[in-house]
Image: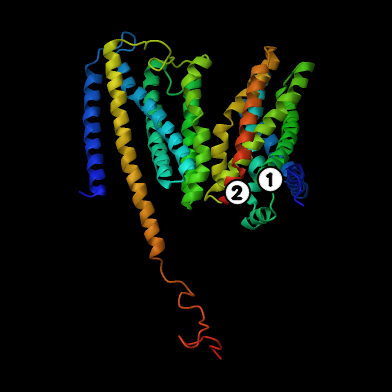
Amino acid sequence: MTPSFGAQLRAVMRRDLDRERRSGEVLWITIPFGAIALILVQLSVGADVPVLRDLGPGLYWAVVLLFGVLISVRRTTVETQAQRDLVALLGIDPAAAFAGRALASSLLLLGFQLIVGAVAVLFYDIRFSASGWLAMALVLPLAAYGLAVLGTLAGSIATRAAMGPALIPLIVAPLAVPLLLAATESVEGLRNATGILPWVLLMITVDLVLSITGVLTARPLMETQ
Amino acid sequence: MNPAATQSARRDWLGIVAAVAILGAFILALLSPPDRVQGDLTRMLYIHVPTILTAYLAFIVTTVATIAYLVSRRLSWDRLAASSAEVGVVFLGLAILTGMVWGKPVWGVWWTWDARLTTTALMFFIYLGYLGLRRGISDPVARARRSAILGIVAVAQIPIVHFSVTWWNALHQPPTILRPGDPQIDTPLLIALLVGIGAFMLVYAWLVARRVELERHEAARLDAAIDDAAPVAGDAITSPSLDAATGPSTRGAGT
């Protein structure tokens, strides 16, 4: 009996999270690297607290975008052809494989955002009201999910391409701008109490469009691998 | 005359017409009156605006050809998509460069973090990624399918670039010609601009025609190389014949 779509999705997601648990690549390498990047930028900007407070949120999102690409494409770039063939021969629905991988990356990215976010709050003295922190609980997962889906999609497109690992950030970074823009404007909206609804809607729209594109193109992309 | 020679003659004529049109556009740009505020600097816009509009056209052609490929699965559409994107990136690069040259004396800086400029730069990098992806995949079918997805996603950038000056408070001026209502420009300047746009689009058509032809030759050469491949180990082995009356049996060979 063929497992349901949901069961396949959960299996792929569990596989990716197990791999991360064993390797600790995100926890022990990418997250410290992101935190160091934030600290280094602070060194280059100077010690002016008001300036750092203004720059902090933007720098945080830039770090999330650049390092998020590393997280969302990490498995695609190291996966061997034999592993891809095995997944295909097992009869796993390509859309379930895509969604499972994207969701696993979303969770890892969310962990990255939370830990590096704590570093940003401490080092850049970022302040929100209580409702602002609550709103961030909505903004962070939406941005993490969008980046993860985009990275997974770009990874699928560039699989087996010469220069693939170098090429993926070039594809992802410009296309992630609507997410980056919505995330930074949301934070600005929270700090200035000007409302964040349009930016949240933009993130939801981008997430939906990317999810539909990823699911619809999963099979043709797998066929050309 | 054979079809290839006819096509070649058409391309040559297109090249001649494009060259004449560019010459005409150049003369009109020199003869048109200077702008009351910008003076002669405005002449740079007779190159800048046509190049960006030609880049838009090129990327729209890429998307249409991509969709046509996905529907028909004919690689000739994919070749058109790739060629148009390549020429489009050249025109977009020219638009950015001419904008910077114009921006330095008018705005005082080569580059400013304006919505139009930023989104245009992003579009440039998105299509560079598209071309990079194509270079990285050698199998023509896999290349066509995978780049098709990126080609379709990337075209969403055109309305963002064009309307960015309306959506955000931008330093870059709002649309002058492609806007609701009449164009906000005097007639002599508008004529020079429209001739420039037509001339640059003819140059685009000629370059794409040349590039498609080059891609076609490249594909034919690759096919020929596969057909005339050097002999490989195992070529000399033939399948064993089980009919002893019609030929020698290989059963027991080597014993």
In the structure shown, which secondary structural element does the residue marked by tag 2 occupy?
helix
Q: Residue B69: give x, y in percent of width and height.
A: 46, 42
Considering every residue shown, the one lying at the far bottom of the view is B255
- Give the quadrant of residue B208: top left
Residue at the spot of label 2: A222
The answer to which of B112 and A45 lies nearer the viewer is B112
Snapshot colouring: rainbow
Q: State whether residue A178 is above or below residue B135.
A: above
**How many numbered marks are there?**
2
Q: How crowded is mark 1: few (under 14 residues within 10 Å), some or many (20 or more)?
A: many
Q: State whether residue B55 is above or below residue A48.
A: below
Question: What separation in Å lies between label 2 and label 1 (alpha carbons)?
Answer: 10 Å
Left or right relative to A119: residue A151: left
Considering every residue shown, the one lying at the far top of the view is B36
The answer to which of B183 and A194 lies nearer the viewer is B183
Residue at the spot of label 1: A97
In the structure shown, which secondary structural element does the residue marked by tag 1 occupy?
helix
Q: How crowded is mark 2: few (under 14 residues within 10 Å), some or many (20 or more)?
A: some
- Specify the amino acid type for callout 2: Met
Chain under numbered label 1: A
Residue B9: tell me if it is visible.
yes
- Specify the amino acid type for callout 1: Ala
Residue B112: tell me if it is visible.
no
